[in-house]
Amino acid sequence: MTVVELSGGVGGAKLAEGLAAHLGQDLIVVVNTGDDLERHGLAIWPDHDTVAYTLADLDDEVRGWGLRDETWTVMDRLAALGEEPWFRLGDRDLATHLWRTDRLLAGDRPTAVALALRSALGFAPTILPMADEPVRTQVRTDDGWLDFQEYFVHRHQAPDVHEVRFDGIESARATPEVRAAIGTADAIVLAPSNPIVSLAPVLAVPGLRDAIDEARSRGVPVVGVSGILGGVALKGPADRMLASLGHESSALGVARLLRDLLDVFVIDAVDADLASAIRALGPRVVVADTIMTDDEARSRVGALVLAATRAVPSAR
Amino acid sequence: MTVVELSGGVGGAKLAEGLAAHLGQDLIVVVNTGDDLERHGLAIWPDHDTVAYTLADLDDEVRGWGLRDETWTVMDRLAALGEEPWFRLGDRDLATHLWRTDRLLAGDRPTAVALALRSALGFAPTILPMADEPVRTQVRTDDGWLDFQEYFVHRHQAPDVHEVRFDGIESARATPEVRAAIGTADAIVLAPSNPIVSLAPVLAVPGLRDAIDEARSRGVPVVGVSGILGGVALKGPADRMLASLGHESSALGVARLLRDLLDVFVIDAVDADLASAIRALGPRVVVADTIMTDDEARSRVGALVLAATRAVPSAR
């Protein structure tokens, strides 16, 4: 079976690894590009690279981002020049950005660059940027609108987020590759990524949601996985962001945001008491251990997500 | 006294170090930008950085370019991604390019960026780009027109050069800083750099030659140093380039190219037999040991060049 996963960074990458253990090249990850940025003239794609490095088994699982066995010579030297960069790029990671920037400057579409990087890194699944046009997530805080990475990395997600926008989204279009992937998918998976700044930009790309709705009308199930466990985000600011935007910081709160889309929602065993309230919103609910601490756990969660897709009666 | 040196890369950098030993902050190096290039989206200034690293005593004297104690993690990783870059950038060197590219993208003039890098690296003389507008040297070979670094680095200076042009030169202008430096200089020094692709682009910047002529009309001497010794370039392809362009590959050939500009020409002792022929072209000739192998030799050559500027009767 072919599965399309809509994904942000770390949580989505872990689930992608778990799904890839069963699907190999039949997994297509459509990745958020709203976190992308330009630094030092280089094109940096944090969510894409987190997924790519994880699928290539190059990720640093201890640090939680970037490459294993990383060195920091370039950043240390930048500091010696008097500039202490808040967005730190490791030496090995920088090579990816140089490699990508060359291709983008040569006129290649981001999608083509992502496909070429897959070949260069040598992993089986496909990663597709959600769109080829630039989309830049911004968050409104008490200090005004901030670029996403300014908020996320530079300010350590400390400010409360009052509003989110995706600059450029109206000019973006679901790519032919993304539409074809969704059009031929047997199931669509929503990663346990931040629903507000990881999943929402993907779903907001014009044409992408239509493609999903069209797939669902043919009986293709959408299975979500909650990234909020016991009211807390496993990683990142999703919990505080949900709260400051007036949502409930819980699997139920996430289910409410995604209710129009969910056929099945996988929640963690710690949230079993929320199952009936989520069911009342519409989706089936699967309760399971969902923490993906190691390869074995990722594979197990991947398997149960795939099983959940099959639990949906087809032909709606 | 204030001295302006017009310079290319390695030879000019060595002389700059020798002059700086006596002049400190009263040395202003106007550096060729025709060799500059963009790689991976980064602004790379080879001649500027060679002079800057040398003046900051960070240069790798064994390798002859780049920084001492350099590492190559980024390039090695690029190779692992399947791209073996012909223009190799060390990790520490890359930091300079990231630092510079940030400032240029922020809208700073190249001159301002060069001045800021001087502060960051902490050396006494000033380095000024010959112009703020992009100038790109190209050479015509049997394979057609090549970008300078394509010829110089990628093809190892192997092709014969039949013609040279400086793309963008007609839109360039001598900067206020360069004109002010020349306008207040007590002497102007032409580095032992390649006369065709290092000195010629500097002298071709509209307004720069006029500023020199105006200084000379006030009695400011121009002292050149030959980079061709015994018919051979100490470094780089100047000798073959002179020959393939129909010039004599010798100190005399260089003197003929620069004759309109030279008040004094410093040639090496090995070329003593050319002194009278060069004198016949107009300039005084100083014959001396000019090879700058170590700091002591550089300082000695710097001193003799400064002495040569004083040997010129002022008020022409």
Image: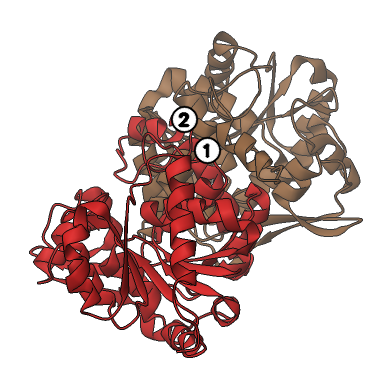
Chain colours: A brown, B red
* A224 vs A8, nearest the viewer: A8
* Residue at 12% in and 57% down: B159
* Residue at 45% in and 77% down: B221
Q: Secondary structure at mark 2?
A: loop
> What's the amino acid at mark 2?
Thr
**Mark 2: few/some/many CA within 10 Å (<14, 14-19, 20+):** some
Q: Mark 1 vs mark 2: tell me if same chain.
A: yes
The image quarter containing residue B37 is bottom left
Q: Is residue B55 in sight in this rendering?
A: yes
Q: Is residue A78 left or right of residue A282?
A: left
Q: Is residue A80 left or right of residue B156?
A: right
* B169 vs A289, nearest the viewer: B169
* B283 vs A159, nearest the viewer: B283
Label 1, on which residue? Answer: B92
Q: Chain of mark 1?
A: B
In the picture shown, does residue B300 fall above or below A236? below
Q: Secondary structure at mark 1?
A: helix
Q: Earlier in the sequence, mark 1 or mark 2?
A: 2
- Residue B71 disc label: 2
* B299 vs A288, nearest the viewer: B299
Q: Are marks 1 and 2 in contact (CB under 8 Å)?
A: yes
**Which x, y percent locates residue A68?**
54, 21
> What's the amino acid at mark 1?
Arg
Q: Is residue A294 left or right of residue B51?
A: right
